Amino acid sequence: MSTRPADTIRTIPVDLIRPGSQQARRHFDAASLAELAESIRESGVVQPVVLRTRVWGYELLAGERRWRAAQSAGLHAIPAIIRDDLSDTEAFVVGLIENLQRESLTPMEAAAGMKRLGEVFELTHEQIGKRIGKSREYVSNYLRLLHLAPEVAALVNEGHIHLGHAKVLAGLALRDQVGMADEVIRHKLTVRALERRIAAMRDARIVFKPAGKASDWTALERALSDQLGYPVSVSAERSGEGELKVKFHSLDELEGLLERIGYRAD
């Protein structure tokens, strides 16, 4: 049986390889890279990288960490599979899937990569999950991280805050996220303890409807409820900030609500 060109392993000089422009991975832990370099000095590069031919040499689609470690180990060439059959979007998917399967991306890199995958192919969370071999819940939880304040996102990437905590923090207003993240770290809160603190914080905030305007607020709630077809409540704090809540009783009702307001999942 003949071997397809895409499956043929070739040896390519490391100085002819450059990282791809759409690489999802941006962070490389120095200590981990040094360990891999030492392993490569002893045993060589076991898993070939994936490349595409370019006028100037080869574009790296998957295996940037191995390529970097091979350079540190003093190798002049590494094994590679050439995939000139891939389009730009297909090349991006190959690199993203390998990194996700190897769990070599930081949480924020993984989230950004999934978002990009969904945008390129107009995929739902469930469809993204099928592409990368993960569940819809896995994808949704990672995409929530994109709602984190930059300071909190950095703490997640550095491992100071776990994904369970990050998922909860992402549901807060940006102004509350940093303070709560600090609470998690200082008091070593569990996810349940964090949820209780957030509930207590919300209960402690004074919610009111401005005097003399109760009928206006009630009318607004009624009008919104009629328009959406679901119970709506509106409240405000003394600072002027507030909440608009829409109640649903099942996921089917939620889907109907989302369709009514024109929302389409990434």
Image (tube, helix red, strand yellow):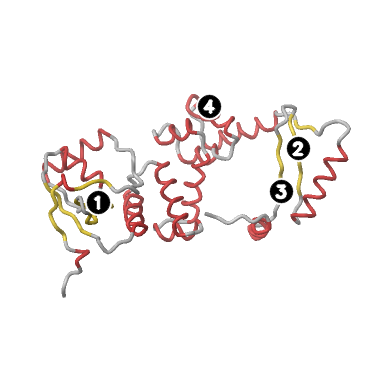
Q: Which mark is residue 59?
A: 1
Q: Earlier in the sequence, mark 1 or mark 2?
A: 1
Q: Position of residue 174 (x, y in %)?
A: 57, 33
Three-letter code, disc 1: Glu
Q: What residue sits right under mark 4 in the picture?
A: 183
What separation in Å lies between label 4 and label 3 (alpha carbons)? 30 Å
> Are the residues at dot 3 and dot 2 in contact (C-beta closer than 8 Å)?
no
Q: Earlier in the sequence, mark 4 or mark 3?
A: 4
- In terms of secondary structure, where does tag 3 sit? strand
Q: Which mark is residue 246?
A: 3
Q: What residue sits right under mark 2 in the picture?
A: 235
For the N terminus, the quadrant is: bottom left
Q: Earlier in the sequence, mark 1 or mark 4?
A: 1
Three-letter code, disc 3: Val
Q: Nearer the viewer, mark 1 or mark 4?
A: 1
Q: Residues within 10 Å of mark 2 (few under 14, many from 20)?
A: some
What separation in Å lies between label 2 and label 4 (alpha carbons)? 27 Å
- In terms of secondary structure, where does tag 4 sit? helix
